[in-house]
Image (tube, grey):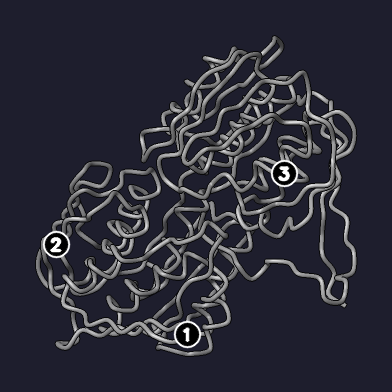
Amino acid sequence: MKRLYKYIIKGGKPLHGEVEISGAKNAAVAIIPAAMLVDGVCRIENLPQISDTEKLLRILELMGAQVRYVSPGTVDIDCSGVSLSDRIFRYTRSIRASYYLIGSMLGRFGKARTTMPGGCNFGVRPIDQHIKGMKALGATIDIGKGLIQAESPEGRLKGARIYLDKVSVGATINVMIAAATAKGMTIIENVAREPHIVDLANFLNSMGADIRGAGTDVIKVRGVERLHGGSYSLIPDQIEAGTFMTAVAAAGGEVRLNNVIPRHLECISAKLREMGVAITEGDDYIVVRRDCPLERTNVKTLPYPGFPTDMQPQICVVLCLAAGTSVITEGVWDNRYQYVNELKKMGAEITVSGKTAVVEGVRSLMGAPVAARDLRAGAAMVVAGLCAEGTTVIEDVIYIERGYQNIVGKLRALGADIAAVSEPDEPGRMHQSSQESAC
């Protein structure tokens, strides 16, 4: 029988020490598909060792790429011999970021064939803006029976002016990848500005692309004939760093986070400071300390540079321990609050109405059996377990390991009492390991 893993956490232990933050997951899952455009060997450094990156690398291998692990966190990719293949479908169905293959396939072959992506269970997460961008670049799109098929009648996409109807990280990335080798100039307006979008642009430019404006509201892409090989190191993971910051805020203690870009964390740091958490910044590190009672605050998630939706569940745990009433307003994903019922099992007092959650502070959370409903919800359960009284058992941790490299080992090194244990899968048991995403 298949063996599943769960985390067992005995809470109430403050965190102390240093932790190394891994490369950005959300940059990695865009850059690996973009490597398909490169002729020659592309070396990617600071690559997080998580299941999402492993699946994307496997997809490239099934398409004929040569993938060589140079060292932990460093991989060489040679896509000179890639071709379209239906063999990738078992993986594309299980990861949200597989939709970036649409842009990279169209850019490489002038045609694309893949499945609808998998995803954390956030309800409807349409890819209409992705499709709008590809059509504007000259592709015909056919979606049916779970497949996405696209083709440029002329064999190469053409530059265009594209206005995204809503700020979409995924659509911004996908159109930028597709436009990198399109004929002529592409201007993308109303784009997302997240750090990993800038990182993707920097990666493509280092391989010979001509992309300007990443990090602003307008990105201009002058298509080139081909991209050449090279080396690139990913930025640190903003969300992993933020998760450890909230873990210290919830459990107490003092931790130095190495390999971070403090500027990327300003929106998170600002909220934690409002709550009484001490944060000291260096060039490539921050120190987080919490040794006093937490104060209430309000949080609204917004596209970057606003507070990230991927940090909403984790900050909610901290708010549960703050005296008074806090309010969270979700401005990105309407179904982000699925974790709330799990926190209620631990004694949290949270009322959700539409996009708003009202959090009443409690003296402490209590350990309980809970489940990771998605990647970031799972991270929130870990943070809750670290600060709770008693023992917390977290099921479905496969979600968590999609986005956090060695989270158990890193927390143990900080003094947490956490262990990953395996158990056989029960006959007929329902679990959602196939519904994964780039959330």
Q: Is residue 278 visible?
A: no
How many residues crowd around disc 3 within 10 Å: few (fewer than 14), some, or many (20 or more)? many
User: Which quadrant is home to the N terminus?
Assistant: bottom right
Residue hosting label 1: 63
Amino acid bearing label 1: Met
Q: Which residue is mark 3?
A: 342
- Image coordinates for residue 392, horizontal then vertical, percent: 84, 41
Residue drawn at (78%, 23%) of the image: 364
User: Which of the two residues, 414 or 210, is positioned nearer the viewer here?
Assistant: 414
Give the foreground label among 2 and 1. Answer: 2
Label 1 crowd (10 A; few <14 / some 14-19 / many >=20): some
Which residue type does callout 2 highlight? Thr
How many circles with numbers are drawn on the protein?
A: 3
Horizontal and vertical percent position of residue 93? 54, 76
Marks 2 and 3 in Cβ contact (< 8 Å): no
Judging by the rendered image, the residue that carries numbered circle 2 is 186
Q: Earlier in the sequence, mark 2 or mark 1?
A: 1
Mark 2 against mark 3, which lies toward the viewer?
3
